[in-house]
Image (tube, rainbow, N blue to C red):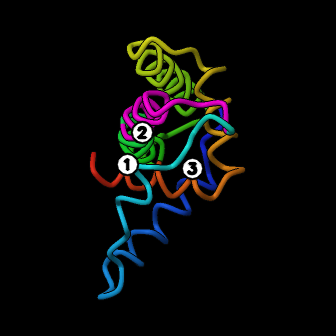
Amino acid sequence: MKRPTKLTACLLAAAAFAAGPSGAQDDSALAVLDLRPYGVSAEDLETFADIFVDVEKISIRYEMELARAENERETALLRARQERETRQQIEKRGWTEAKYEQVNEIVDRNPALLTRVLALIEERS
């Protein structure tokens, strides 16, 4: 499963932006965003944000373990466990990996959705 790299990079940029004095966003504009043209619901974005936070926690934990791996076999075993845990987190929310990837692609292509998802992720972090 590919990681949503654009979203991850935007998270870092958004955190830096929000820390500044003019970083306050107009949450009301995000709340009234009409999602119908994008083919996702507000519930989809909420679930996506929940999953994204869970997946990032798993990724961070395994990055540290992978850095300590002593050989390729150990690395492969760790990656397999990471993928399994990631899939379980996605399925725990009633989604498939395909749905997660689909929503990720929609969010990555639409700046307004990306802004909304970043705000949701920030709330959860």
Q: Which residue is mark 3?
A: 113
For label 3, the crowd category at 10 Å Cα-Cα, with few meaning under 14, some 14 to 19 and many 20 or more, is: many
User: Residue drawn at (39%, 47%), measured in percent from left and top?
Assistant: 64
Report the predominant secondary structure element of the magenta stretch: helix
**Amino acid at circle 3:** Leu
**Amino acid at circle 2:** Ala
Q: CA distance from mark 2 to mark 1?
A: 5 Å
Instruction: Locate residue 85: give its quadrant.
Output: top left
Q: Earlier in the sequence, mark 2 or mark 1?
A: 2
Q: Which residue is mark 1?
A: 121
Q: Which residues are magenta?
A: 38-53
Classify 24 as above or below 92.
below
Per the rendering, the mark at residue 24 is none
The image shows residue 57 at horizontal and vertical percentages of 35, 41
**Nearest to the observer: residue 22 or residue 124:** 22
User: Residue drawn at (49%, 71%), measured in percent from left and top?
Assistant: 13
Magenta highlight on residue 47? yes
